[in-house]
Amino acid sequence: MSKIRVLLVDDEGDYVTALADRMDLRDLQSQTATSGEEALLTLKTSPPNVIVLDLWMPGLGGLAVLEEVKKLHPSMEVIILTGHGSDQEEMEARRLGAFAYFRKPVDINELVQAVRRAGEATHGARV
């Protein structure tokens, strides 16, 4: 069985590391990035099945990253996870192709279920 590879992108280093640990415990293979720019570089060198992406980050923000991901990899699924999102930003994220949209704090089991659904939808990964 191949594990779903998930890229977790959030400028809060401690948060993204803790989230990665929780994903790993649930049999998901995670990697992290702490900026939009780092996420796009990771996409080129080690593309994931699914991206979990924060909206508000210094430099390249989440909506810009989402738009670029969809240009480069139209079938790659992106899940937004934000602490500061608005209804308008949720609508824009969905228009740009976000698979799901969560606000922090998120129930880890709901997020994991969304990651698994996104991974299966995108790549037929077996979990």
Image: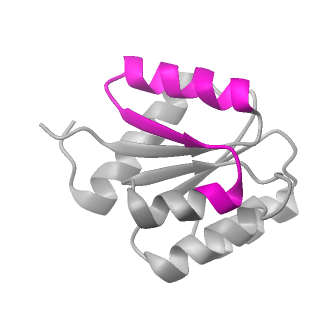
Q: Residue at x 41, y 61 (%)?
A: 45
In the image, which residues are magenta? Answer: 13-38
Q: Position of residue 11 (x, y in %)?
A: 76, 42
Q: Position of residue 76 (x, y in %)?
A: 42, 65
Rendered-image quadrant of the C terminus? top left
Image height of 126 relative to 49, above or below: above
Identify the main secondary structure in magenta: helix
Given residues 43 and 67, the one toward you in this image is 43
20 drawn magenta: yes
Q: Position of residue 97 (x, y in %)?
A: 57, 71
Q: Position of residue 96 (x, y in %)?
A: 64, 75
Viewer can see residue 99 = no
Image height of 112 relative to 101, above or below: above
Image height of 86 relative to 84, above or below: below
Given residues 5 and 89, the one toward you in this image is 5
Side of 55 where 43 appears, left or right = left
**According to the image, what is the colour scheme of the structure?**
one colour
Asked which quadrant contains residue 104, the reply is top right
Side of 5 where 100 appears, left or right = right
Viewer can see residue 95 = yes
